[in-house]
Image (cartoon, rainbow, N blue to C red):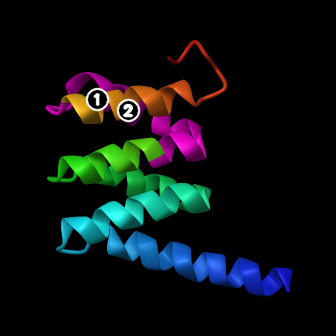
Amino acid sequence: MAEKIIAHRSVNMESNIEALRNEDPNVRWEAARALGVIRDPRAVEPLIAALGDRDPDVRRKAALSLGKIRDPKAVEPLLTCSVKDENQVVRWAAAWGLGKFPDRKIA
């Protein structure tokens, strides 16, 4: 049973990574959200790339999801996003994501 759950999770993760490139921003937003729920480290690079999405809701959800995954590779991109993103809510989400890392010196 556990093997079926793991296999389903992996397929779902791959589908969501692919959906981050969808034309519809609502699909990209939902994919970024779902990757944060799955919390698989393989989603880190695609979520980092999503921090540059043209839609602020996608960038916000990517930042929140990176905070849930807590992979050290996301620290620098989140820090940059928390300071330089043009959208205040996205900057807040990136700061929130940084605050989820166990090393409080980051935030």
Above or below 65: residue 17 = below
Q: Is residue 83 magenta?
A: yes
Q: How many marks can you see?
A: 2
- In the foreground, 47 or 60: 60
Q: From which residue to which does the magenta span run? A: 65-87
In the image: residue 11, left or right of residue 1 = left
**What secondary structure is found at the residue carrying circle 2?**
helix
Q: Residue furthest right?
A: 1
Marks 1/2: CA–CA distance: 5 Å
Residue at the (76%, 87%) spot, across then down: 4
**Mark 2: few, some, or many residues within 10 Å (few <14, many ≥20)?**
many
90 in relation to 35, above or below: above
In the image, taking residue 38 as reference, residue 84 lies left or right, namely: left
Q: Is residue 69 left or right of residue 78?
A: right
In the image, what residue occupies the spot 33% across and 28% down?
A: 92
Residue at the image position 31 percent from the left and 61 percent from the top: 29
74, above or below 98, in the image: below
Q: Which mark is residue 10?
A: none
> Cβ–Cβ below 8 Å for labels 1 and 2?
yes
Residue matched to label 1: 91
| Quadrant of residue 96 within the rendered picture | top left
- The 10 Å Cα crowd at callout 1, few under 14, some 14 to 19, many 20 or more, is many
Q: Position of residue 12 (x, y in %)?
A: 54, 78
Helix, strand or loop at mark 1: helix
Image position, residue 59 (x, y; %):
28, 47
Q: Position of residue 41 (x, y in %)?
A: 60, 55
Give the labeled residue for mark 2. Answer: 94
Amino acid marked by disc 1:
Arg
Q: Amino acid at mark 2?
A: Ala
